[in-house]
Image (cartoon, rainbow, N blue to C red):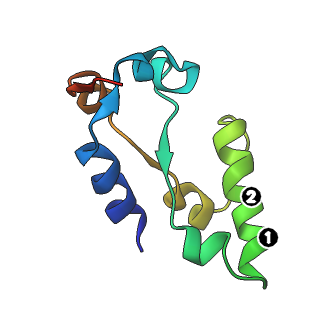
Amino acid sequence: YTAEQARQEYLELVLPEDWSSIPAVKHKRVYALEANSYFSRPGPRLVRGVEVLAKILHPSMAASREAERAVLPIAAAAVAGKRAASV
C-alpha cells in the first residue's frame, strides 16, 4: 500500500461536514505515508519511520532524503472542495 494509494483513497472519501474544522485539515497538515515500509513491521526502517514523523511534526528539522520523500501532503484544495456527508 503506497503513500500515493493512501492519498488517492483519502481524496475519494466523502467526509463529514465538520471535517474542515479539524485543525490539521484547516492548516493543511494532512499527509499520506507508506505505513508498511515505516510503521507496520519491526526492524531498521522503523527508525526511519520515527524520522518521518519527526519531519511532519517539525517541518524545519533536517531529515534524510528518504524521510523527506516519504511525506506526501494531501492537497488542501482537493479536501476543501469535497462534498460533505450528512451524519
Left or right side of 74 for 66: right
Is residue 63 something one can see in this rendering?
no
Is residue 50 something one can see in this rendering?
yes
**Amino acid at dot 2:** Glu
Establish if 77 lies above or below 61.
Answer: above
**Amino acid at dot 1:** Val
Left or right side of 35 for 86: left
Disc number placed over residue 51 in the picture, else none: 2
Looking at the picture, how far across and down is residue 47, in whole percent? 79, 70
Q: Element at badge 2?
A: helix
Looking at the picture, how far across and down is residue 10, in whole percent? 34, 48
Instruction: Assess disc 1: are there few (<14), some (14-19) or many (≥20) residues with their C-alpha within 10 Å of its C-alpha.
Output: few
Instruction: Assess disc 2: are there few (<14), some (14-19) or many (≥20) residues with their C-alpha within 10 Å of its C-alpha.
Output: many
Which residue is at a point 51% across and 59% down the rendered structure image?
33
Report which quarter residue 39 is drawn in.
Answer: bottom right
How much space separates mark 1 and mark 2, taking CA atoms?
A: 6 Å
Q: Element at badge 1?
A: helix
Front residue of this view, candidates 19 and 57: 19
Residue positioned most to the front: 87
Split into 4 quadrants, where in the image is the N terminus? bottom left
Which residue is at a point 61% across and 61% down the rendered structure image?
67
What residue did someone put label 1 on? 47
Report which quarter residue 86 is drawn in.
Answer: top left
Q: Are marks 1 and 2 in contact (CB under 8 Å)?
A: yes
